[in-house]
Structure formats: structure tokens, C-alpha cells
């Protein structure tokens, strides 16, 4: 009667061992993870824009003649590099130029008349002086004759002055007509590149009426100087100061461009419907090598450097969970949740002030299933 009891005990023991082995194997089942080592390195505190920014030229001019008329001459084409004060476009102005020629001739005539009058005046003055000397020493000429000659000399000198004033008047008239001619000309206000031309020879152009913008005849850009204008959240804006270093990232290029400096911070907050309130910040690029491939209009992001530490204990930002926690992997693979005190923070790294040590391995695969505290893990090869 005892044998069946022993068999039952043996069976129960075997089942218990099998269950224990099953649960032990299940408990020690390892999950593959990626890890990073807590180490010393540079940590940079930065602020980035909330919406995409735009590359802009430091100088851009929408040019049109000051007076309306028919386009007579177009001296440039799109893409041309121009120098300051170079003539770009000319509205029909032959009538004004003819008036300039007429005023030049009038000025020459008036100068000749003035020369004649002044010569006569000088001669009359000399004659009056001789008469005065004769009257003083020899009394050959009466005082009345001397007075007549002196009066005639003064009159001819007045004629000379009047003729000189006539020259000045004709020159002023010529300058007025020349100013009218210049209102028909479009000159380059600075060295730049012709980006766009919105008119053709023979078309009529008119200045924009007040409050009604029209297309400019010529769009001129100075691409030797570029900056990025981007909106920064109003919460982050007070930390930014002009002169701070900044990097620029562009969708069109893989590498960052870090020669930028904050050149302007808008003195007001932009308030747009259904959007966060932002402050416009401008970052100017200073390295010619970083500027030469850029074009105004590219989309760009800015990253302003607030402060940095060269030799700080740091952990990758992607390893950080809510409430500044990480999963630390021990040598046996056990995952432990540990809190730490953060310092400087950016998108890539977080400074560790306390709670972690150099050499600790933290899990990067924090979003993966079964990667939780208490689980066992192994480094993914």
C-alpha cells in the first residue's frame, strides 16, 4: 500500500521541479537592448526655433523708377552681378534730356554774356581810377566828370553781377531738369545680384499708389551677407542675447553651419491666431564658406548656444524617461530604474549632477516591449 504513495510523491516532486525550471528560465529570459555609457564630455544648453525659419539677404531692394513711363532701356538681365550706382533700367526721357541740352547751351550763352559784362565793368573801373588821379594831381578833369565815370563803372559792375546771377539761374534750371531725368533712371543702391525683373522694354511702369503694393520692376539682392530669421517661443526668448553663438541647420544640406551669431531680437512678441506666441530672432552667418552655397528663401532652423560645459558627466537624451529616470543595466543584465539630478539639457545630451556614475550603462531602447525595471537584458549585437 506504500508504493502508490511513493509514486505519487515522486510525480509531484517532478512536476514541481519542472515548474520551477520553467519559471526560472522564463524569469531569466533576456531581451536585446542598446546601451550607452555615462561618460565625461561637452554639454551645451541650447534653444531652438518652434517653427521653421527662412534664409534672407541682409540687403534686398525692390526697385522701380520714381516716375511712371514707358520702359526704354533695360541694361541688365536676371542673374547679373551689378555694382553700386550702376544703371539698371531707363524710362523714356528724351524730352527731359533735350531740356538738359538746352539748359547747357543757355548756361554757356549766359557765361559768355557775363564775361563780356564783367570785362566792360573792369575797364570802366580802371578808367574811373585814372580820372580820379588826374583830378587830384592836375585838376584837368572836373569833379563832375570823375563822378560820372565812377557811376558808370559801378553800373557796369552791377551788370556783370547780374550776368553772373543769370548763369547761376540757368545752372539751377539745368539741375532741376537733370533731377527729372534721374527720376526716370533706376540705379543699383548697392553691390548685388539681379534676382528678378518684372517688366519688359515698351511696357509702362508706374510707382505704387499709397497702400497698394505692386510688383517691383527689379528685385536686387546682396547675397554676400545672409541671415536666418526664425521664431523662438516666448518662454525661451528671454534667455537669448545678441552676440550669442548659433548653429544653422537646413533641409537642403546635411551639415550644420555654426559660424552664426545672434544679430537681432525683435522688440515685440508675435501674436498669431491658433499659434504659440513667438519672438523673431535673426542669426547672421559670418563664414564666407558657409554662405556661398546658400540662397535666400531656403528653410532653416537655428540653435542658439546659451552656455556649455566642456567636461561634464552626461547621458544621452534618448535614454531619459519621465521625471529624470533611466534604466541602468548591471553586469548580470538586470535592469534597474534610477533617478538622477539633471543640469544642462539639449536635444542630444543631458548633464548628470548626481545619481549616476561614469561608466554606468544606460538603456537606449526604452520604448521597446519588455524593457522595464526588473527585467534581464543583453546588449544587442
Image (tube, rainbow, N blue to C red):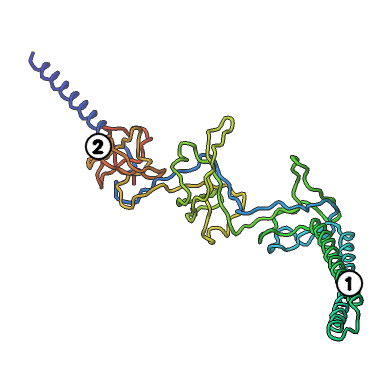
Closer to the camera, 369 or 289? 289
Q: What is the secondary structure assignment of the residue under circle 2?
A: loop
Viewer-closest of 6 and 214: 214
Residue for point 24% across, 44% down: 357
- Looking at this view, name the residue that lies furthest to the top: 1
Q: Is residue 244 left or right of residue 140?
A: left
The reply to whether callout 1 and callout 2 are in contact (CB within 8 Å) is: no
Left or right, residue 272 beside residue 322:
right
**Who is closer to the viewer here, 54 or 85?**
85
The residue indicated by pointer 1 is 151
**Crowd rating for badge 1 (residues with CA inside 10 Å; few <14, some 14–19, many 20+):** some
Drawn side of residue 27 relative to residue 160, left or right? left
Q: Residue drawn at (58%, 54%), measured in percent from left and top?
A: 226
Q: Is residue 182 left or right of residue 102?
A: left
How many residues crowd mark 2 within 10 Å: few (<14), some (14–19), many (20+)?
Answer: some
On the image, numbered disc 2 is attached to which residue?
Answer: 334
- x, y percentage for residue 102? 90, 65
The mark closer to the camera, 1 or 2, is 1
Please, what secondary structure does the residue beneath circle 1 have?
helix
Label 1 to label 2: alpha-carbon separation: 123 Å
Vertical relation: 231 (above or below) 11 = below
- The residue furthest bottom is 138
- Residue 287 or 159: which is nearer the viewer? 159
For image coordinates 10% across by 19% down, the residue present is 6
The x and y percentages for residue 378 are 29, 41
Residue 172: image location, x then y, percent: 82, 62
**Sequence-first tag of 1 and 2:** 1
Q: Residue at x 47, y 54 (%)?
A: 258
Q: Position of residue 122 (x, y in %)?
A: 85, 77
Amino acid at each position: 500500500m506504500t508504493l502508490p504513495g511513493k509514486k505519487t510523491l515522486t510525480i509531484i516532486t517532478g512536476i514541481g521541479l519542472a515548474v520551477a525550471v520553467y519559471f526560472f528560465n522564463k524569469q531569466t529570459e533576456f531581451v536585446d537592448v542598446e546601451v550607452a555609457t555615462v561618460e565625461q564630455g561637452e554639454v551645451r544648453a541650447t534653444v531652438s526655433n518652434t517653427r521653421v525659419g527662412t534664409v534672407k539677404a541682409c540687403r534686398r531692394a525692390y526697385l522701380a523708377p520714381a516716375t511712371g513711363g514707358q520702359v526704354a532701356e533695360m541694361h541688365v538681365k536676371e542673374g547679373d552681378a551689378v555694382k553700386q550706382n550702376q544703371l539698371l533700367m531707363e524710362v523714356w526721357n528724351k524730352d527731359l534730356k533735350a531740356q538738359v541740352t538746352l539748359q547747357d547751351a543757355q548756361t554757356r550763352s549766359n557765361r559768355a554774356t557775363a564775361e563780356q559784362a564783367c570785362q566792360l565793368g573792369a575797364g570802366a573801373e580802371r578808367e574811373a581810377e585814372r580820372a580820379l588821379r588826374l583830378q587830384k594831381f592836375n585838376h584837368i578833369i572836373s569833379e563832375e566828370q570823375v563822378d560820372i565815370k565812377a557811376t558808370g563803372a559801378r553800373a557796369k559792375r552791377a551788370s556783370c553781377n547780374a550776368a553772373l546771377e543769370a548763369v547761376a539761374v540757368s545752372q539751377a534750371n539745368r539741375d532741376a531738369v537733370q533731377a527729372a531725368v534721374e527720376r526716370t533712371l533706376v540705379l543699383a543702391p548697392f553691390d548685388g545680384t539681379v534676382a528678378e525683373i518684372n517688366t519688359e522694354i515698351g511696357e509702362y511702369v508706374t510707382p505704387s499708389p499709397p497702400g497698394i503694393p505692386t510688383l517691383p520692376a527689379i528685385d536686387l539682392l546682396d547675397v554676400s551677407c545672409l541671415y536666418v530669421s526664425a521664431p523662438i517661443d516666448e518662454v525661451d526668448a528671454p534667455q537669448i542675447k545678441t552676440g550669442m553663438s548659433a548653429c544653422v541647420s537646413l533641409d537642403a544640406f546635411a551639415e550644420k553651419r555654426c559660424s552664426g551669431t545672434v544679430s537681432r531680437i525683435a522688440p515685440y512678441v508675435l501674436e498669431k491666431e491658433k499659434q504659440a506666441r513667438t519672438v523673431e530672432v535673426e542669426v547672421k552667418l559670418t563664414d564666407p564658406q558657409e554662405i556661398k552655397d546658400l540662397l535666400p528663401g531656403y528653410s532653416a532652423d537655428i540653435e542658439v548656444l546659451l552656455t556649455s560645459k566642456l567636461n561634464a558627466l552626461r547621458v544621452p537624451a534618448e535614454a531619459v524617461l519621465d521625471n529624470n529616470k533611466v534604466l541602468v543595466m548591471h553586469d548580470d543584465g538586470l535592469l534597474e530604474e534610477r533617478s538622477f539630478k539633471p543640469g544642462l539639457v539639449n536635444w542630444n545630451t543631458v548633464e548628470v549632477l548626481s545619481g549616476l556614475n561614469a561608466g554606468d550603462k544606460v538603456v537606449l531602447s526604452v520604448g521597446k516591449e519588455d524593457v522595464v525595471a526588473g527585467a534581464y537584458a543583453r546588449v544587442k549585437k
